[in-house]
Image (spheres, grey):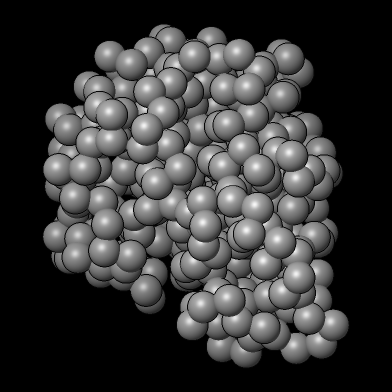
Amino acid sequence: MIISHPACALHDAGPGHPESPTRLAAVLDALNAPAFALVPRQLAPTASIAQLLRVHDPALIERVFASEPSVGQVRLDPDTAMSPHSLEAALRAAGAVIAGVDAVLLGSSRRVFCAVRPPGHHASPSEAMGFCLFNNVAIGAAHALALGLSRVAILDFDVHHGNGTQAIFSAEPRLLFASSHQSPLYPGTGAESEHGVGNIFNAGLMPGARSLEFREAWSTLLFPHIEAFAPQLILISAGFDAHRLDPLAQLNLRTEDFAWISERIVALAERSAHGRIVSSLEGGYSLTALRECTTAHCTALFG
């Protein structure tokens, strides 16, 4: 299943901002290829305030709701802006992941890709930051835990560390968070020494790292912990900005690397989670890489 909503294209962080509506257009262009013609589509609902409150402080939610301008942009931090329609876009992005979780747990779909923006994995309990308003994947994971699951994994291969996701779940043993990311790089978190309550696993990659380092990090540092955890559901923070074409980072992955990790995650999900995966778009700022990596990722998800 592919979940999206036209409102996600209306969020506009301002002229020249890398997190632009053209990103989602590139992703949807890839998903409109004949290879995905038979994949069911669904419009994203809006997340409720009660669902947001599972991971975010009331003060953050109130600030985001109050900050949307009637014209132009309002900045929540130097990188993170809201425009007219940004609030609906953010609520639809979080709602998409919730709907995806419902779909895989109820059996109407085994795998879901949420083609949404703004991204989410930098949004912490108390801060909107790093282009992110609400933490979409964390909200979906909290929804799964509220439905009774006891082992949920979030796998994050965005080039930037998902500091918000880690902060939200660092004391939650029912949630495993595994991340590969460039280090040093924004936001400066994600050291391998950060373990939470034994549920956090980070693999930093030096600038210039290529396929070998990326695949070794997942194969030797991250996948063994995920296998041992035996998740009942896997959520993916699917950022494609570790690609060699991306302008905001310095890793040198190729499209084939995103196919490789996606195939590995699918195989893992088949062994422990009845194949259940919900993936949601995070970063990725080369339109060419976004099209290629979306195709590779969703080919692995949908077969």
Can see residue 223?
A: no
Which residue sits at x=70%, y=39%? Answer: 51
Residue 260 or residue 74, whichever sits in front: 74
The x and y percentages for residue 115 are: 66, 50
Which residue sits at x=51%, y=51%? Answer: 125
Which residue sits at x=85%, y=82%? Answer: 70
> Where, quadrant-wise, is the N terminus in this rendering?
top right
Could you tell whether 93 is left or right of 168 in the image?
Answer: right
The x and y percentages for residue 297 are: 49, 41
Q: Which quadrant of the structure image shows residue 38?
A: top right
- As drawn, 229 above or below 280: above
> Where, quadrant-wise, is the C terminus in this rendering?
top right
Residue 87 or residue 11, whichever sits in front: 87
Can see residue 106?
A: yes
Which residue sits at x=78%, y=32%? Answer: 40
Residue 56 or residue 152, whichever sits in front: 56
The x and y percentages for residue 151 are: 45, 17
Could you tell whether 186 is left or right of 127 in the image?
Answer: left
Q: Which quadrant of the structure image shows residue 183?
A: bottom left
- As drawn, 268 above or below 117: above
The x and y percentages for residue 142 are: 58, 31
- As drawn, 73 above or below 208: below
Total numbered labels: 0
Could you tell whether 221 is left or right of 196 in the image?
Answer: left
